[in-house]
Amino acid sequence: MNILVCICHVPDTTTKIKFTGTELDKNGVQFIIGPYDDYALARAVELKEASKGKLTVLNVGEADTEPTIRKALAIGADNAVRINAHPKDAYFVAEQIAAYAKDKNFDMILMGREASDYNGGQVHGMVAEMLDMPCIVPCMTLEVEGNTAKMGREIEGGKEYVECEMPFVAGCQEPIAEWKIPNMRGIMMARKKPLEVIEPTSQSAPTEVMAYQLPAERGNVKMIDADNMDELVRLLKEEAKVL
Amino acid sequence: MSVLVYIEADNNAVKKSSLEALTYAAKMNAGDVTALVTDKAENLEELGKYGVKTVLQVNDEKLSTRPVSAIASAIAGAAQKVGANAVVMSRSSTVDAAAPRVGVKMKATVASNVVALPQNENGFVVRRGVFTGKAFADTKLEGENKILTIAKNALAVDDSLSGSATVEAFVPEFGAKDFAIKVTDVKKQEGDILLPEADLVVSAGRGMKGPENWEMIENLANKLGAATACSKPVSDMDWRPHHEHVGQTGIKVAPSLYIAIGISGAIQHLAGVNSSKTIVVINKDSEAPFFKSADYGIVGDAFDVVPKLTEALEKAGI
Ligand SMILES: Cc1cc2nc3c(=O)[nH]c(=O)nc-3n(C[C@H](O)[C@H](O)[C@H](O)COP(=O)(O)OP(=O)(O)OC[C@H]3O[C@@H](n4cnc5c(N)ncnc54)[C@H](O)[C@@H]3O)c2cc1C
């Protein structure tokens, strides 16, 4: 099986988000593989090992994303590609991925259901449409039998089980697999694995962030005595008006 | 200029979230509003009171499971038919998956998770929720055509307009691969209130000690008519099903009331719940970080407080 996993490079989930102008304040921020992409990668490693296949990991990013890409190699990808550009928006990223993947005969293109920074959730669908492939999102289980992929996803009110022929695109979410933590051997091997850098093929990015806003702070918490639940019910009814 | 709104219906009735999308479209003041419906639905003329002029109704059994690629073709086809240059739809499992495909088909610019009406002074600018609820991005969209997916509860439904909508049948053209994904099974979750759509949520964490102690959580939820949710470690340990996991890596919720019981309030958990209108925290540790993000706090043992709260609700006639 020939698998492509696309990863983004995002602030650690514990980051306190701050901005300087229209830029994220990166001071002291740790960057990680997008948590949803990390699930996709974990399942891809399992499928690759079971099929003795090949696993390529791709990131659209500038040179500062290389430690994140090396981590994906340490987790089990065989080789990596970095498309050397600031990931301007979802359309821009999707065009780079589609242009790269077009003639590589991937059986599946996996990524997270969304990036945990811009929460666009668009790249999988755009890549699939550009390459005329089916796309499943959120893909929560994935098994392969012959040339058929069997997947499960959550829809309003329950679960839907689907199948399609390969190749396909999927935007993944837990519980598709458990995150894998790289071991020492993986980390050593990752240093020697190939990381190819290629230039972007197009430049169009139809969206631009003009300004960031932080959500309004909640007012001070009102503490209520544990023995006075009647008071809580009263406040929820009369003050908060939610009951 | 005109706007197309793709709407969904359950049990023949248009979903509330779709009515929010119709209200959004009407308030954009960007010309006639056309609604597209591919689900079975009744009384569609009444959508006039949300500002809809025409409803395009697709009657095709093949669309009953909402196959994403086919729905995307229907939306792009309908937009072309009515000459719409904006498509507005409320977020759902179908819309989230279809919007990027429609964007590529229509060469349109897509903005997802939009939380407010557009500003037009300086180009077309919409506010999107980003960094999992930790920030908003005012985003400018270039190009002739736009696709917006609207966050739930982004605005209140307005049914004050008058007039009745004209309902027309519409037969979309499908692509060769639009039905490449076959649905083999659907497992509906009967009875329970569904978390992503719930207006009240009772959520519990590792402080509950074990799955055997969830009865009091369920009793409280039943009393309120609330959905149940949990923190990530709880679903990781299989105390509760995965679809109850809320937070940065789980479901994001924005109910009117979120009651957090025995949850510490880790930043990843808060990311998924901090858009809730009112937050109540019950925790035995007065230093638990969740209290800083709460509207009402109770320091106490959940095993003691939760049954008392259920009782107080009973007494208040809820
Ligand atoms: C990349 C990443 C992503 C993550 N994503 C998520 C996510 O999406 N959602 C999520 O929830 N977590 C997520 N986490 C995990 C998160 O960091 C926390 O570990 C988790 O939220 C803690 O769950 P908890 O509050 O249930 O447990 P704990 O942190 O163990 O807290 C238990 C709380 O219960 C209280 N308690 C104990 N006994 C009682 C009692 N008898 N009565 C009342 N209170 C009691 C304690 O005082 C404590 O505050 C993520 C972590 C990482 C690294």
Image (tube, rainbow, N blue to C red):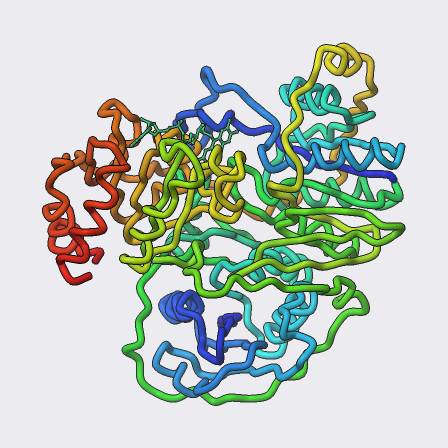
The percent coordinates of residue A22 (x first, y second) are 44, 32
Nearest the camera: B276 or A59? B276
State the quadrant of the C terminus of chain B: bottom left
Query: Considering only vertical position in the picture, is A52 above or below A172?
Result: above
Nearest the camera: B59 or B222? B222
**Ligand 1 quadrant assignment:** top left
Whether residue A210 appears in this view of the structure is no
Horizontal side of residue A79 vs B32, given as left or right: right
Rendered residue at 53%/45% (across/down): B242
Q: Examine the image and state in which quarter residue B102 appears.
A: bottom right
Whether residue B262 appears in this view of the structure is yes
The percent coordinates of residue B139 (x first, y second) are 46, 46
Rendered residue at 42%/79% (across/down): B52
Nearest the camera: A209 or A32? A32
The percent coordinates of residue A205 (x first, y second) are 61, 44
Rendered residue at 71%/52% (across/down): A151
Nearest the camera: B265 or A103? B265
Query: Considering only vertical position in the picture, is B25 above or below B247?
Result: below
The percent coordinates of residue A204 (x first, y second) are 65, 45
Query: Considering only vertical position in the picture, is B82 above or below A176?
Result: below
Horizontal side of residue A81 vs B105, given as left or right: right
Rendered residue at 71%/19% (across/down): A70
Residue placed farthest to the front in the image? B212
Number of marks: 0
